[in-house]
Amino acid sequence: MSTYVISDLHGCLDEFRTMLDLINFTDYDELYINGDVCDRGKRPIELLRLIMAHKNMHLIFGNHDVWLARYAEDLIKGKDSPSHLRLLGGDFVNWIHFNGGLVTMDQFMDCEYSVCYDILEYLGNPEYYKELQVGHQKFLIVHAGLGDRWRLGLPVCEYSENELIWPHIGINDNPYPDVMMIVGHMPTFLYGKQYENRIIHGRNLLHIDCGCVFGRTLGCVRLDDLQEFYVPSTCPYLE
């Protein structure tokens, strides 16, 4: 049995399936998806349903998953009454039109009601971080890090939802010397060209969003031995 972490799939279903084949993922393994299953890519709802169907795949919420969870019930209402969606505020518009949520919304609303309610129920019990130990190593899996207060070294349970899903942290922003933190959220190429298409190793901190939906690669790490796996993106290359 092995434990893997991947992040920021953003609807990249084909690359995800290729990765599962590459790591020889079985029912005896565990996979943690460190946020942002939805939005931007081509097949977010199909990807989410695949994850939902596997008890050994665990979603740690990212900001894009929070958006879908926040508006899923409104989208169900919108299936019967499209005018309902026009009443929603600026945050909904920001998600749909400026953060890749339109493809998620369209595919969600094309689903049968039973599927929509299954997704609503699945997203109703969010996890924003996961602490676990593999072998002798302790890990903290959290989508975006710990925000501006990371230097305080507070227990992770004292950080707010926004601090766990939104900030852009530095390469070494981990306050826990005996815990390896694993984050996504910010594609590694944004830290510099030298980090393009690969996982960044900071100070006891792995940045694993390798920018698949932006045309780079999909990265995955096996926690048992920290071996890295990569699948080339089929998405258009975006600066």
Image (cartoon, rainbow, N blue to C red):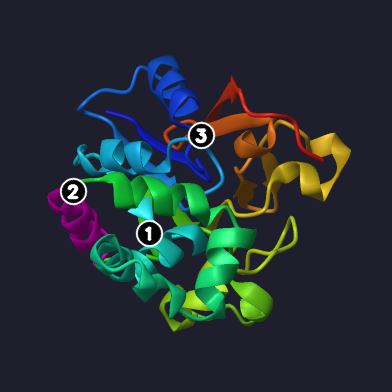
Q: Residues within 10 Å of mark 1 (few under 14, many from 20)?
A: some
Give the SS element for disc 1.
Answer: strand
- Residue 185 is situated, as x and y percent measured from the top left of the image, at 60, 54
Q: Nearer the viewer, residue 175 or 231?
A: 231
Q: Mark 3 is on which residue type?
A: Val
Q: Which residue is mark 3?
A: 221
Give the SS element for disc 2.
Answer: helix
Q: CA distance from mark 1 to mark 3?
A: 15 Å
Q: Mark 2 is on which residue type?
A: Val
Report the residue at 39% width, 16% height from top.
Answer: 21
Image position of 60 with respect to 221: above or below = below
When asked about the image quadrant of residue 231, the answer is: top right
Report the residue at 52% width, 58% height from top.
Answer: 143
Q: Residues within 10 Å of mark 3 (few under 14, many from 20)?
A: many
- Residue 7 is situated, as x and y percent measured from the top left of the image, at 51, 44
Q: Which residue is mark 1?
A: 130
Report the residue at 41% width, 49% height from top.
Answer: 106
Q: Earlier in the sequence, mark 1 or mark 3?
A: 1
Give the residues in magenta: 113-124
Image position of 45 with respect to 177: above or below = above
Left or right placement of residue 132 versus residue 199 in this view: left
Numbered label attached to residue 115: 2
Q: Disc 2 or disc 3, which is closer to the eye? A: 2
Q: Nearer the viewer, residue 23 or 91?
A: 91
Quarter that holds the N terminus? top left
Q: Is residue 142 visible?
A: no
Image position of 70 with respect to 68: above or below = below
Numbered label attached to residue 234: none
